[in-house]
Amino acid sequence: KDNVAVLQRYYPNLCAAGRYFYKKKQYGEVTKFMEMVLDVPHMPIWGSERDVTRSRRYTDHAYLHLRSAYLNEDYNRVERYKSLVLADSAYRYNTLEMLAMSAFGRNDIPMYLDYLKQGLRENPLAPFFFTHLTDY
């Protein structure tokens, strides 16, 4: 129990470190800290408390991870928390765009086209999805 209390007390520092490195544009560091922020509450050492995983901040941190991985051109990490981020309508459009470009960066053309089609279905007036899809 003592370890759980200490970990939960210092958890906000992990979040702050990730945001600090984001402001410094050190995106590789951001992804490392955000993975800790997002994964630790699911580990046994965290205990049974799960409220943090249902908070708005948790989704914000998942988006920060996705965006940082994308900006760092670490395309294999971009999709790690995509389901969490895609569930948030505020981030959905930008997330689909980054997922598409990450798939393209990995040379995964079928997935690239799937993301473009999904984006076009959901945002028929958005030029990004249409213009990229017309290339294929």
Image: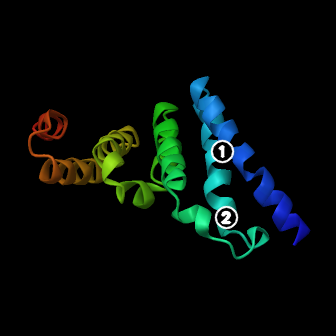
Residue most extreme to the right: 2
**Callout 1 secondary element:** helix
Q: Position of residue 96 (x, y in %)?
A: 30, 47
Q: Is residue 78 visible?
A: yes
Q: Residue at x 48, y 56 (%)?
A: 81
Count neighbours of disc 1 (C-alpha within 10 A) and say few if under 14, some if 14 to 19, many if 20 or more: some
Q: Quadrant of the N terminus?
A: bottom right
The residues tagged by marks 1 and 2 sit, at their Cα atoms, a distance apart of 12 Å
Q: Is residue 76 visible?
A: no
Q: Which residue is mark 1?
A: 15
Q: Amino acid at mark 2?
A: Pro
Say which of 72 and 84 sits in front. Answer: 84
> On screen, 97 above or below 3?
above
Q: Is residue 40 left or right of residue 59?
A: right
Q: Earlier in the sequence, mark 1 or mark 2?
A: 1
Q: Is residue 45 left or right of residue 71?
A: right
Could you say which disc has been placed on residue 126 in the image? Answer: none
Q: Position of residue 94 (x, y in %)?
A: 32, 41
Q: Amino acid at mark 1?
A: Cys
Could you say which disc has been placed on residue 41 in the image? Answer: 2
Say which of 9 and 115 sits in front. Answer: 9
Q: Position of residue 70 (x, y in %)?
A: 46, 37
Q: Residue at x 68, y 52 (%)?
A: 36
**Callout 2 secondary element:** helix
Give the quadrant of residue 98: top left
> On screen, 110 above or below 125?
below
